[in-house]
Image (cartoon, coloured by chain):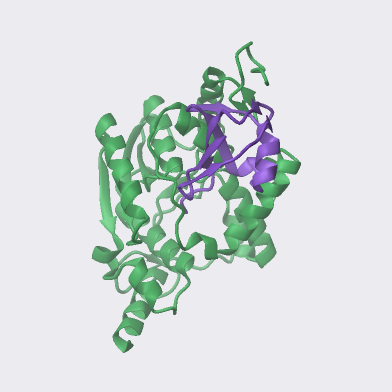
């Protein structure tokens, strides 16, 4: 039986090898260090936390409330049956107990279809469609806030480094980071969990006795990300520290690279008035395509 | 030993004595992918488990 490296109690975690009390201390300190080192936000800022009701977003809300930050939530219901209902229920219990305001929006109200309905056409890639609409709605409803905080963790970030490398997504590769650049069109996005693994986040959730659903998105198994995730988890088990090494190597490289000057000019979408890389933003283009396919069927 | 796998809501009965790591190897599950609880308390991979134990495996993998 392993003992905590900071005291004589039994360890409940191997990486780092700590007891429950010291793990909690480690976890909260890691979040504080990330917020302060990367100047993510201050106690004067209004923070919009993107919440799904899953473990990452509930843990993020929980830590930020403990650290006395000014947080509110934004919940986006994609319309995935037998999946999102359970996490919405967990979210409702969580925010009621802590009295946190959360705004709720749905794909159905905003785009006129659920993700399930769009996927039934078999013409769209689930994660591309879902990701584009989620980012669009997040930016749309977070305009009044200083910053958007998401529960992206070390697993997500190290996977993204490898995915962008493997796919040759050089533009996306250069934009990744613990915080995005603020500009007049987009609310700055920050990731306070960038240096905490999914396993550490779930450990925190268990220790804090927060109720979360463990269902996996039915579309996630289809993704390229799922393959990279499985590969990285195998590497992490055989060589602990791999995920952090991938992200830290990327960030060290990133800090030496100047942002490209030929970035596309941001325009205003002719249809929705939101920021766009072209005359019509990606979200409006996709929504139109889905409606066109649905009408034909 | 009774093992409840939260992700699939599946319960397995197994005659096993050894460490958590050996148990997960037997089940073909990566330790990196799960948290292991005995009677509601987290245990690490080097912990000895026996046939009389009741374990829960929580999936670390995010909802998506």
Picture quadrant where residue A218 is located? bottom left
Residue A259 visible in image: no
Q: Is residue A30 left or right of residue A170?
A: left
Residue at 64% x, 11% y is A8
Residue A107, position in %: x, y? 30, 63
State left or right for residue A294 relative to residue B42. left
**Which image quadrant: the C terminus of chain A?**
bottom left
Relative to A268, A55 lies left or right = right
Indicate the position of residue A139 as horizontal and vertical percent values: 36, 55
As drawn, the residue found furthest toward the top would be A8
Give the residue displayed 40% in from the left and 29% down from the top: A209
- Looking at the rendered structure, the number of numbered marks drawn on it comes to 0
Residue lying farthest to the front in this orientation: B15
From the viewer's side, name the closer residue of A67 and A208: A208
Residue in the picture at 63% in, 65% down:
A169
Residue A11 against residue A296 in the figure, above or below: above
Q: Colour of chain A?
A: green
The residue nearer to you, when weighing A260 against A205, is A205
**In the image, residue A138 above or below residue A293:** above
Q: Which residue is at a point 46% across and 42% down the rendered structure image?
A: A56
Placement of the N terminus of chain A among the 4 image quadrants = top right
Instruction: Point out residue A221 in the picture as x, y percentages from the top left corner.
Output: 53, 61
In-front residue for pair A246/A42: A246
A273 relative position to A248: left or right: left
Residue A51 is at least partly visible in this image: yes
Seen in the picture, residue A201 relative to A2 is either above or below; the reply is below
**Dividing the picture into quarters, in which one does residue A228 lie?**
bottom right
Find residue A223 and report its horizontal and vertical position in percent: 55, 64
- Furthest residue to the right? A239
> Chain B takes which shade in the image?
purple
């Amino acid at each position: 039986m392993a003992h905590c490296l900071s005291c004589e109690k039994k360890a409940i975690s191997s990486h780092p090898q700590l007891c429950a009390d010291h793990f909690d201390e480690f976890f909260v300190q890691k979040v504080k260090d990330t917020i302060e080192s990367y100047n993510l936000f201050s106690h004067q800022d209004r923070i919009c936390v993107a919440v799904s009701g899953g473990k990452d977003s509930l843990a993020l809300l929980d830590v930020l409330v403990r650290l006395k930050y000014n947080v509110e939530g934004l919940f986006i219901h994609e319309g995935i049956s037998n999946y999102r209902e359970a996490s919405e229920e967990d979210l409702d219990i969580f925010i009621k107990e802590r009295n946190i305001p959360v705004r709720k929006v749905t794909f159905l109200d905003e785009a006129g279809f659920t993700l399930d309905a769009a996927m039934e056409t078999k013409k769209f890639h689930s994660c591309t469609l879902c990701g584009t609409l989620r980012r669009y709605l997040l930016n749309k409803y977070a305009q009044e806030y200083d910053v958007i905080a998401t529960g992206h963790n070390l697993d997500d970030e190290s996977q993204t480094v490898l995915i962008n490398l493997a796919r040759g997504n050089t533009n996306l590769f250069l934009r990744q980071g613990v915080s995005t650049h603020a500009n007049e069109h987009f609310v700055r996005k920050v990731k306070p969990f960038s240096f905490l693994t999914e396993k550490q986040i779930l450990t925190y959730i268990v220790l804090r006795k927060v109720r979360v659903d463990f269902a996996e998105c039915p579309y996630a198994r289809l993704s390229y990300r799922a393959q990279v995730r499985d590969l990285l988890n195998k590497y992490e088990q055989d060589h602990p520290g791999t995920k952090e090494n991938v992200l830290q190597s990327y960030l060290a490289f990133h800090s030496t690279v100047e942002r490209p000057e030929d970035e596309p000019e941001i325009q205003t979408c002719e249809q929705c008035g939101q920021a766009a890389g072209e005359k019509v933003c990606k979200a409006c283009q996709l929504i139109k395509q889905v409606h066109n396919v649905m009408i034909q069927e | 030993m009774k093992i409840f796998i939260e992700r699939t809501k599946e319960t397995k009965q197994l005659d096993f004595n050894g460490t958590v790591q050996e148990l997960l190897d037997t089940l073909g599950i990566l330790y990196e992918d799960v948290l292991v609880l005995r009677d509601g308390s987290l245990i690490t991979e080097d912990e000895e488990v026996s046939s009389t134990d009741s374990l829960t495996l929580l999936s670390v993998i995010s909802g998506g």
